[in-house]
């Protein structure tokens, strides 16, 4: 196996330095020869200059050479040194030049496998023995001594190179580690630049790996990673390099492979794995793109695969989305608006909060729904700027509503998984609240059920940090999936928002109504305040009131609109009804934020 340290930059630098040093050393020997050997001196000077120029050329562009070309570099060095030893007119000069063969020995064991390096060493030793044998003044002992020096260098350098190579190898899976990945990607980028061939990169994430560690311990997790590494490597096409990128994430470098072909290869690999589910993100290298940019786009594609439900592969966009360009311009111009929808407490039907919703009016396309521009922001690195702008405007609008309505309000805002995965997100939120003057205990960050279930460790840490500062967390769109139900007792959440699709059938489906009552009871027992979304009819409101749902929102209580459109507190009069424990708990949590005598 070729040593992993034998990257094009290292080989070019090492061979170039050795050729330059050897050329200068040979030049010093030639210049020091007695005058009677003027012709020999001229030839040796020529070889020395030629060696130096070769070294300079390798230092300049040697990294562009393919690996197999360095066999010729080593052989050429052996031939030049053998000829120089033969030409040396004195035994001392011959031994001095012969000592430069240690450079050849180092190159051989640094560049090639042990077997191939040994063949190069054998050829060099044979040439050296023949060359030194042409000098009658040198006995067998001198030849043996020179050979032993080269052998000793080889014996020392070989294991050191193997040890250095192991530093780029993951001890658990045997795959290249992050260091090995970085070196391999750099080499692949250099090759792609030289040959103009396609290059693709894929990131592979093990779905729900944390659950494996939680249930079976780290031994089970390690065993799964070892199995997946072997199975994935076997399923990839020839030439693809599988590496362990870190934790439960793998990276695949696919030289001379287009994005479409890479996506197909990853799908073949993914579907062949029966031990566990995998999510994959694929990106193809652009000519002017750095390795970090390529890795970022592959990571965005991986996130899209996870957000789509996991167990799938997604391809990064190969061209900049025009919608993203327009969105970036809108963010820079401050033309993203925020609408507010009331959150109402039952059974009193008093407004106790508002949800902030991003709105974008495109100059040509008209209204662009969040379901279109939010994914575009996530896929093109705009989500952090978008989220910061929406949060700031939401705080400003909520402050206006508090002054207009004469009561404190709970403000809920949506957060993206990309934002939560940013270690600095919590600090950004707190800084925005401080700047805008909005109290942290009156803010709720909403995240979707699918995002929470698949949240990374950094995202969970972010949620925990937000809660430590008094900011509450709500699981949004609950009821559209099943994953978060089994983890309601461990999620860092305070509110549970039932999706409108769940609520829409409670008046026609007794089973759905029974499920609603069970969820309300479960939320009450777990300390999760339930908010029902999408309330559009009086019948739905009455059923939710009788079932004990503490908080609701929907068109029945008000459509989303700008803060300026809410000149008065939106209300829907109804007769007071007995409160359940959940309703009383929800009302009390808001009562603490309302000054005496200032009830809405």
Image (cartoon, helix red, strand yellow):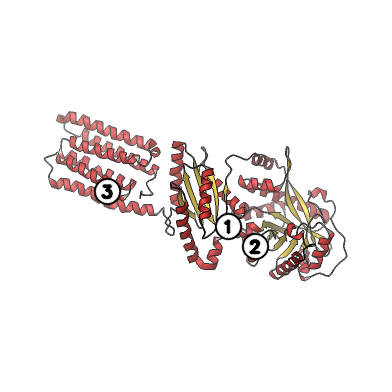
Q: How many labels does the image show?
A: 3
Circle 2 sits on which residue?
484
Left or right of 142: which side holds 27?
right
Task: Find the distance from the CA under tag 1 to the CA under tag 2.
Answer: 18 Å
The C terminus lies in which quarter of the figure? bottom right
Q: Which of marks 1 and 2 is in front?
A: 2
Q: Is mark 3 on a helix, strand or loop?
A: helix
Mark closer to the chain start, 1 or 3: 3
Viewer-proximal residue, 56 or 509? 509
Residue 61: x and y, percent?
A: 39, 36
| Label located before the other in sequence (1 or 2) | 1
Task: Check residue 458 in the rendering and tell me which mark sits there, or answer none.
Answer: 1
Q: Callout 1 environment at 10 Å: few (<14), some (14 to 19), or many (20+)?
A: few
The x, y position of residue 533, in whole percent, is 76, 58
Which residue is under mark 3? Answer: 118
Distance from disc 1 to disc 3, alpha carbons, whole Å, reads: 49 Å
| Foreground residue among 185 and 39 | 185
Q: In this view, does 283 lie to the left or right of 357?
A: left
At horizontal 51% and vertical 67% (from top left) the residue drawn is 217
- The answer to which quarter of the image holds residue 470 is bottom right
């Amino acid at each position: 196996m070729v040593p992993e340290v034998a990257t094009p930059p290292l080989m070019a630098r090492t061979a170039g330095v050795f050729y330059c040093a050897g050329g200068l050393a040979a030049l010093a020997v030639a210049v020091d020869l007695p005058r009677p050997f003027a012709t020999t001196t001229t030839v040796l000077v020529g070889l020395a200059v030629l060696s130096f120029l070769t070294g300079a050329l390798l230092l300049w562009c040697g990294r562009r050479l393919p690996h197999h070309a360095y066999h010729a570099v080593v052989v050429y060095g052996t031939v030049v040194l053998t000829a120089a030893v033969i030409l040396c007119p004195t035994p001392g000069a011959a031994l001095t030049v012969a000592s430069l063969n240690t450079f050849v020995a180092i190159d051989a064991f640094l560049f090639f496998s042990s077997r191939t390096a040994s063949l190069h060493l054998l050829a060099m030793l044979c040439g050296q023995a023949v060359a030194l044998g042409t000098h009658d003044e040198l006995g067998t002992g001198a030849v043996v001594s020179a050979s032993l020096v080269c052998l000793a260098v080889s014996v020392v350098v070989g294991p050191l190179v193997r040890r250095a190579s192991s530093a780029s190898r993951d001890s658990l899976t045997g795959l290249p580690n992050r260091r090995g990945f970085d070196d391999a990607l750099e080499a692949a980028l250099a090759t792609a630049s030289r040959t103009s061939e396609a290059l693709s990169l894929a990131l592979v994430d093990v779905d729900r790996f944390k659950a494996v560690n939680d249930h079976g311990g780290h031994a089970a997790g390690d065993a799964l990673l070892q199995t997946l590494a072997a199975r994935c490597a076997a399923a990839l096409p020839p030439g693809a390099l599988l590496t362990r990128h870190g934790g439960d994430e793998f990276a695949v470098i696919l030289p001379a492979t287009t994005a479409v072909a890479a996506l197909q290869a990853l799908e073949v690999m993914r579907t062949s794995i029966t031990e566990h589910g995998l999510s994959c993100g694929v990106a193809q290298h652009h000519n002017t793109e750095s390795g970090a940019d390529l890795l970022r786009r592959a990571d965005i594609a991986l996130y899209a695969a996870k957000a789509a439900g996991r167990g799938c592969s997604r391809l990064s966009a190969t061209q900049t989305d025009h919608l993203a360009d327009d969105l970036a311009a809108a963010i820079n111009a401050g033309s993203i608006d925020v609408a507010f929808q009331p959150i109402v407490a039952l059974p009193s039907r008093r407004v106790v909060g508002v949800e902030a919703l991003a709105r974008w009016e495109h100059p040509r396309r008209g209204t662009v729904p969040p379901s279109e521009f939010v994914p575009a922001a996530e896929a093109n690195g705009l989500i952090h700027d978008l989220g910061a702008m929406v949060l700031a405007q939401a705080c400003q609008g909520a402050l206006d509503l508090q002054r207009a309505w004469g009561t404190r309000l709970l403000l809920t805002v949506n957060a993206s998984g990309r934002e939560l995965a940013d270690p600095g997100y919590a600090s950004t939120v707190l800084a925005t609240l401080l700047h805008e003057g909005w109290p942290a205990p009156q803010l709720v960050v909403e995240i979707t059920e699918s995002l929470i279930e698949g949240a990374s460790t950094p995202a969970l840490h972010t949620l925990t940090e937000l809660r430590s500062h008094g900011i509450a967390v709500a699981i949004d769109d609950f009821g559209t999936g099943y994953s978060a139900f089994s983890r309601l007792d461990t999620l860092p959440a305070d509110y549970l928002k039932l999706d409108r699709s769940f609520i829409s059938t409670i008046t026609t489906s007794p089973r759905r109504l029974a499920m609603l009552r069970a969820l309300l009871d479960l939320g009450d027992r777990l300390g999760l305040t339930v908010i029902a979304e999408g309330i559009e009819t009086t019948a739905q409101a009455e059923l939710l009131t009788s079932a004990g749902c503490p908080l609701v929102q929907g068109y029945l209580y008000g459509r989303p609109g700008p803060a300026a459109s809410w000149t008065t507190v939106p209300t829907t009069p109804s007769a007071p009804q007995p409160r359940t424990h959940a309703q009383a708990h929800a009302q009390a949590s808001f009562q603490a934020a309302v000054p005496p005598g200032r009830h809405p």
